[in-house]
Image: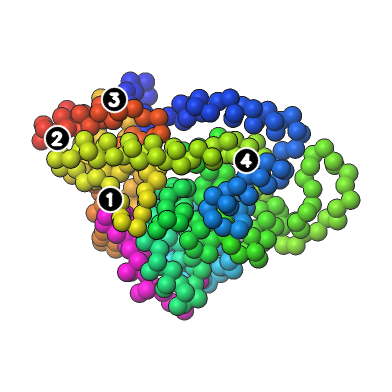
Amino acid sequence: MGRGARVVVPMTDLASEYRSLEGPIDAAIRRVLNSGHYALGPELEAFEAEFAAYCGVSHAVGVGSGTAAVQLALIAAGVGEGDEVITVPNTDSPTVMAITHVGASVVWVDTDPQTFNMDPHLVEAAVTSRTRAIIPVHLFGHPVDMDPVLEIARRHGITVIEDAALAAGARYRDRRTGGLGHIGCFSLAPGKVLGGYGDGGIVVTDDDAIAGRLGVLRNYGHAPGMSLDERNLIGTERWTVLEEGYNERLDEAWAAVLRVKLPSLDERIDRRRAAAARYTERLAGLPVVTPHEATYARHAYHSYQVLIDDRDAARRTLERRGIATRLFYIPPLHLQPAYAWLGLGPGSFPVTESTSSRMLALPLFPQISEDQIDEVVDALAAHLDLGGQDG
């Protein structure tokens, strides 16, 4: 929205979420500050154990961002120069950056027109002798149909790395995202379904070897067990660098905050789902396609995405009424300047291009009120009653 514009309904409201947990969050941060232990400490270790249990897996490894989560997962899985990784073009650029930064090539497949996720029926044809990984992206909080993807991967010996950056707590056939493939990757940035107050990410897996290597990679390649306890600068640990790694640790303070927020994550998802249900009910009868929830899925509703003709005119009308909206990953990556060298122009992925041209995210967050939702719907209905003209 334009600078200085009156905001009636914001896209999200992170401050209100903080206020709902203000006391415990402040206490957690003070606990870390008073401990003098700010990296790879007990808060991170505890959060990793708690998040692994939440996802139903054996290991969780906190890292510096969701981007780092995907990149380190690829490295830990042995993906590198000359390999191919299958994913979708309607994701955020870090998914693909992680692939190219390890020296692999991205292979895109088109998406399902209802869920906007990877179309599993197109994956088989994209597999070659060079395919080392598949990255299904659980877009906007709706899980990918994982069973056919996992079956293709099993037959070809391919690693499945879930990009669940927008889908913490979502479920596929009663199992939470992240614990479905070989490795699951999450962003813990502020605007995510589970987010802290700075960058962060986490990787989950049942594979002991992958978890061990992730722990090495995130900490410069140093051997496990080397202390980063700032209170004990003179230690007895032997300094061993096992490989060239990265500075990609999840901060101790943010781990403490996330420990406060994790127990109420499902409750906040329930609030998101209730808000989405009200939107869907109120939008019924309007020429708007509302989000689809497949029978195998329990949507976490990171965002509420509708399809509407002349999307840009509708967006201008809403924003003049003080209602924030957002375009996610539009245009898709194959039409972005950074990937022009791949030579994939318009028409390469017709379903993705069609949905992207009509997609609009409406305000949704756990604390959104029914009155705010009604304000959005009434403004959109008034716009459509005018024949879609700017008004």
How far separated are the C-alphas under marks 2 and 3?
Answer: 20 Å
Expressed as whole percent of the image width and height from the top left, the position of residue 343 reads 35, 64
Classify 316 as above or below 295: above
Magenta highlight range: 106-132
Is residue 390 at least partly visible in the picture?
Answer: no
How far separated are the C-alphas under marks 3 and 4?
Answer: 34 Å
Q: Residue type at mark 1?
A: His
Q: Which residue is mark 1?
A: 292
Q: Are marks 3 and 1 in contact (CB under 8 Å)?
A: no
Given residues 307 and 279, the one toward you in this image is 279
Q: Which residue is mark 2?
A: 384
Expressed as whole percent of the image width and height from the top left, the position of residue 267 reads 45, 38
Compare marks 4 and 1 and give the one earlier in the sequence: 4
Q: Residue type at mark 3?
A: Asp
Expressed as whole percent of the image width and height from the top left, the position of residue 308 reads 21, 43
How far separated are the C-alphas under marks 2 and 1?
Answer: 22 Å
Label 2 vs label 1, nearer the camera:
1
Q: Residue type at mark 2?
A: Leu
Classify 33 as above or below 361: above
Q: Which residue is mark 4?
A: 255
Compare marks 2 and 1 and give the one earlier in the sequence: 1
Given residues 206 and 167, the one toward you in this image is 206
Quadrant of the image for the C terminus?
top left
